């Protein structure tokens, strides 16, 4: 007979040994309540906070958050070790197995006690928090739902972490190895495996872009990563179920699978495993191989980094060394004997071959990553991020766009397909900076099945011009780069004029701001890529808008924008103030590659080039700055400043640059 002791009696007896855990969990609950009280007190005594701000502080603290998640994780691990450490003692395990009760009942009694302790004290803490919030007059439906959501999330987090830790304790024979096993289970997929495609892709693929979608999928690799993803605030409005539902469901699925797996392993776990490193020797080889493969790859990449990334061939000896070393270390832990370093050499060789094959598959691109361009019938839209976009993306505040579709998409796709087929994404440039110019574009393909794929292509100047000539007149492209096309203009707080020699923040009414922006966009719509490439802008509009923080966005003004310039002049901006009408005393040309300087003081030379110098533009716009390696400094007096000479950088064309260098002082 193995059922003479009832489940509840077994629970009661087990609970007698859990006093320390009860006190630890109670301390956690008191600390959380105390933290809420401190947060509320600090908020209410801050004279700068209004009632809605205090409400936001309370809502943020009572919602699922990282700090409490870390505390729950520590408690869950401690409870797992406390409840199942007896498995690692031959004396205690003999006593437990001598009881007339099934192992399954023992397992569930320990598990239910752990959950009961946590959920009861968690409920008490949540109720006290509700009472405090209600007494201060901040309780409403949203606040109640937030506190209830936190309790549900923390219970799921506790159960997932607890069962993962229990699995490690069941599969090992001593507590130290059990703790190492927990670390492996928590981090293997979301941290160890996660970054292997990234480091190998960035090393061997020419068109590699960080796979954000793939990295997001790795969050589902362990209850620990799901716990942090579940409590991470994804929106400016705070934590919501809509952004975390999939993480919660994945965590619940983990809990069910782990509960069944832990029970089955607990039932078949041999008693003689106590004191050994691993309880199931048949699984040792599989576990070791799964651990050694990523360790060997990381070792190879480490040696590659130590050699300053001079040659990827350095990864090979690093992989060999890492494979031998980590295979031996893990086997020594298994055997609790240093002689394990040289055991199972055939398995070590198999592991080494697998590790090298994984790296070689990236090196030879057997996946066709670099050659990938989707078929037209599978593609929904394309978005191109060129250098100009990347410089603007951090300050974009308009409505996000889906990308370029329709006939414009098909024309752009054809250019991309031809460019990749012709191998135009590999451009050679001499070490001194001479040779064919090139530019890198990040291309985002959105497929009709909803998937998104990104590639970084490095194109020749001709291909770059073909792409930008297609993109520039595209309304969809402009809306994705320039906020003014889609944003709420009422959020604009100020507009300034800047041409490096004159800066004016205009005192405009809202109607005047809108009038200026209408005029500007009308003229900007008529700008061709050829004009933007070959013409230096005269200046720019600096647009400030309100939001979570004040952000500045810049819009270039070209000589052809006569209506815009006339409006600015009417509002007090000195749009005619250029280097052509100031007194220049000296010009310096500095070669940033060879560190050579040319100084020009001859007034005849200076006067001959003044009309062709611009104090604004260069590589800050689409302008094809052929003189990127040279910095030009102009020293001038503008007639307004009484304290002396000023200095500014200047931009010009290649012929004018050569004239300056030829006219330099001996």
Image: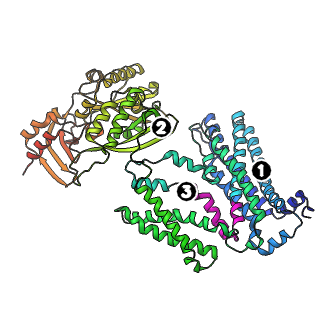
* Secondary structure of residue under mark 1: helix
User: Where residue 420 sits in the image (x, y, percent)?
Assistant: 34, 43
Q: Is residue 194 left or right of residue 663?
A: right
Q: Position of residue 212 (x, y in %)?
A: 49, 46
Q: Residue placed at 79% from the left, 50% from the top?
A: 120
Residue drawn at x 72%, y 49% as measured from the top left: 155
Visible in this render: residue 110?
yes
Q: Residue at x 60, y 47 (%)?
A: 229
User: Upstream in the sequence, badge 3 or badge 1?
Assistant: 1
Residues 132 and 238: in front is: 238
Q: Secondary structure at mark 3?
A: helix
Residue 549 bears which disc, if any? 2
Q: Tell me which segment is drawn in magenta.
A: 165-190
List x then y, in percent, for residue 183. 62, 62
Residue annotated with mark 3: 191
Q: CA distance from mark 3 to mark 2?
A: 33 Å
Q: Does the segment drawn in magenta span residue 170?
A: yes
């Amino acid at each position: 007979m193995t059922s003479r002791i009832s489940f509840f009696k077994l629970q009661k007896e087990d609970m007698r040994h859990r006093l320390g855990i009860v006190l630890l969990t109670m301390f956690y609950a008191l600390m959380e309540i105390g933290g809420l009280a401190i947060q509320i007190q600090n908020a209410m005594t801050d004279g700068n906070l209004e009632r809605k701000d205090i409400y936001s502080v309370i809502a943020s603290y009572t919602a699922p958050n990282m700090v409490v998640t870390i505390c729950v994780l520590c408690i869950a691990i401690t409870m797992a070790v406390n409840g199942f450490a007896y498995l690692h003692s031959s004396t205690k395990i003999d006593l437990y197995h001598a009881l007339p009760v099934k192992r399954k009942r023992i397992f569930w009694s320990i598990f239910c006690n752990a959950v009961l302790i946590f959920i009861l004290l968690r409920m008490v803490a949540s109720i006290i928090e509700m009472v405090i919030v209600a007494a201060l007059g901040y309780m409403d439906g949203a606040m109640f739902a937030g506190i209830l959501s936190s309790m549900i999330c923390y219970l799921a987090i506790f159960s997932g972490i607890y069962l993962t830790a229990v699995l490690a304790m069941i599969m090992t024979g001593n507590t130290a190895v059990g703790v190492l096993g927990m670390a492996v289970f928590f981090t293997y997929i979301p941290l160890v495996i996660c970054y292997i495609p990234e480091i190998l892709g960035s090393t061997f693929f020419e068109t590699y872009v960080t796979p954000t979608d793939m990295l997001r999928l790795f969050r589902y690799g362990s209850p620990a990563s799901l716990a942090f993803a579940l409590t991470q605030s994804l929106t400016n409005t705070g934590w919501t179920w809509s952004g975390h539902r999939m993480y919660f469901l994945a965590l619940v699925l983990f809990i069910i699978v782990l509960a069944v797996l832990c029970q089955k392993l607990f039932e078949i776990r041999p008693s003689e495993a106590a004191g050994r490193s691993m309880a199931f020797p048949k699984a040792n080889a599989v576990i070791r191989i799964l651990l050694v493969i990523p360790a060997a790859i990381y070792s190879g990449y480490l040696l590659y980094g130590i050699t300053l990334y001079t040659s990827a061939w350095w990864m090979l000896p690093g992989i060999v060394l890492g494979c031998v070393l980590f295979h031996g270390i893990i086997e020594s832990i298994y055997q609790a004997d240093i002689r394990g370093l040289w055991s199972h050499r055939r398995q070590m060789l198999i592991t080494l071959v697998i590790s090298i094959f994984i790296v070689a598959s990236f090196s030879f691109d057997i996946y066709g990553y670099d050659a990938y361009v989707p078929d037209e019938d599978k593609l929904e839209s394309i978005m191109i991020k060129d250098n100009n976009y990347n410089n603007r993306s951090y300050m974009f505040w308009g409505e996000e766009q889906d990308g370029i579709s329709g006939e414009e998409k098909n024309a752009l796709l054809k250019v991309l397909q031809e460019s990749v087929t012709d191998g135009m994404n590999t451009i050679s440039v001499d070490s001194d900076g001479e040779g064919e110019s090139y530019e890198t574009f990040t291309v985002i393909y959105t497929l009709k099945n909803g998937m998104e794929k990104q590639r970084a292509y490095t194109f020749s100047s001709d291909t770059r011009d073909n792409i930008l000539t297609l993109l520039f007149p595209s309304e969809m492209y402009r809306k994705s780069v320039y906020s003014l096309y889609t944003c709420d203009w009422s959020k604009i707080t100020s507009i300034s004029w800047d041409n490096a020699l004159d800066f004016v923040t205009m005192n405009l009414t809202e109607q005047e701001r809108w009038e200026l922006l209408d005029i500007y966009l009308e003229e900007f719509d008529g700008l061709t890529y050829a004009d933007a490439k070959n013409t230096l802008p005269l200046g720019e509009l600096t647009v400030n808008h309100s939001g979570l923080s004040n952000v500045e966005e810049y819009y270039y003004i070209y000589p052809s924008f006569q209506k815009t310039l006339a409006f600015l002049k009417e509002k007090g901006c000195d749009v005619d103030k250029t280097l052509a009408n100031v007194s220049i005393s000296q010009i310096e040309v500095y070669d940033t590659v060879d560190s050579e300087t040319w100084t020009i003081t001859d007034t005849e030379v200076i006067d001959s080039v003044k009309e062709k110098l611009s104090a604004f533009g260069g590589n800050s716009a689409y302008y094809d700055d052929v003189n990127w390696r040279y910095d030009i400094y102009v020293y001038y007096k503008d007639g307004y400043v009484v304290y002396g000479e000023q200095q500014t950088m200047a931009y010009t064309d290649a012929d004018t640059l050569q004239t300056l260098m030829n006219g330099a002082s001996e």
